[in-house]
Amino acid sequence: MKWAIIGTWRMCLEGIIAAAEILKRGGDSGDAVEKAVKAVEDYPLYKSVDSGGLPNENCEVEMDAAFMDGDTLSIGVVASIRDFKNPVSIARRLSRERFNIFLVGSGAEEYAHKNGFERKNMLTDRAKKIWEKRVREINDNNLSPYDGHDTVGVVCVDGKGRMAAASSTSGLFMKKGVGLETHRYAVPACMWTAKSEARRQRGLARI
């Protein structure tokens, strides 16, 4: 069986190429989508995903991520998590739990800590400077604080027909308080819905 992988936006390209090497060796779809999303999370110049992500109104980088196994329908979601690297990996680990698979804020952070994930201040100097500039613009020109954002999402079918999908984001720039963009939690449902279509159109985005 042939494999396929597709992701959102240009920022996914390098991650998709790296994930393709896993699939070429007969690897697992879950490993592939995690690899692809982590590549985006780790790149400091992308302003809407994790490392380098733009902060909320309090200058804190809050991150959201989701992972789903398309065959077992197991899902894990973390939201408004701060100071942990690669939330997509935390979401994937959470998807293996039987209960409490959607954790927010301090609950997500406690879970990540207990499971040995790397704690890291995700606010970069570049992101802080952009935040400071926007605060000045708001005060001087009465501008709206909000700005655009992009969520990275990857869906994959491996050579054995197993499907997985994942998404990650740092959300809307300058969001208020403990921010939560709930649209991304429709993503797991979309992952499941996409399963039969992805298999039917397996040639899409084949590398």
Image (cartoon, rainbow, N blue to C red):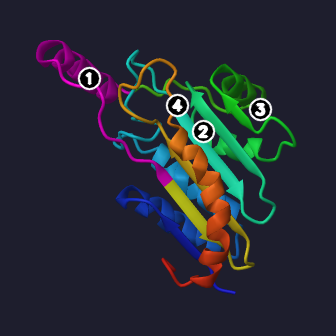
Task: Give whichever of discs 4 and 3 has the lower sequence position.
Answer: 3
**Camera-nearest label, 4 or 1:** 4
**Camera-nearest label, 2 or 4:** 4
What is the C-alpha distance between the residues marked 3 and 1? Answer: 33 Å
Q: Which residue is mark 3?
A: 115
Mark 1 nearby-residue class (10 Å; few <14, some 14–19, many ≥20): few
Whether 94 is drawn above or below 153: the answer is above
Q: Which residue is mark 1?
A: 129
Task: Give whichever of discs 2 and 1 has the lower sequence position.
Answer: 2
Is residue 34 something one can see in this rendering? no
Residue furthest to the top: 139
What is the C-alpha distance between the residues marked 2 and 1? Answer: 24 Å
Three-letter amino acid code at the position of disc 4: Leu
Q: Residue 13 location, x and y as percent?
A: 42, 63
In this picture, which residue range is highlighted in magenta?
A: 124-152
Task: Give whichever of discs 4 and 1 has the lower sequence position.
Answer: 1
Under circle 2, the secondary element is helix
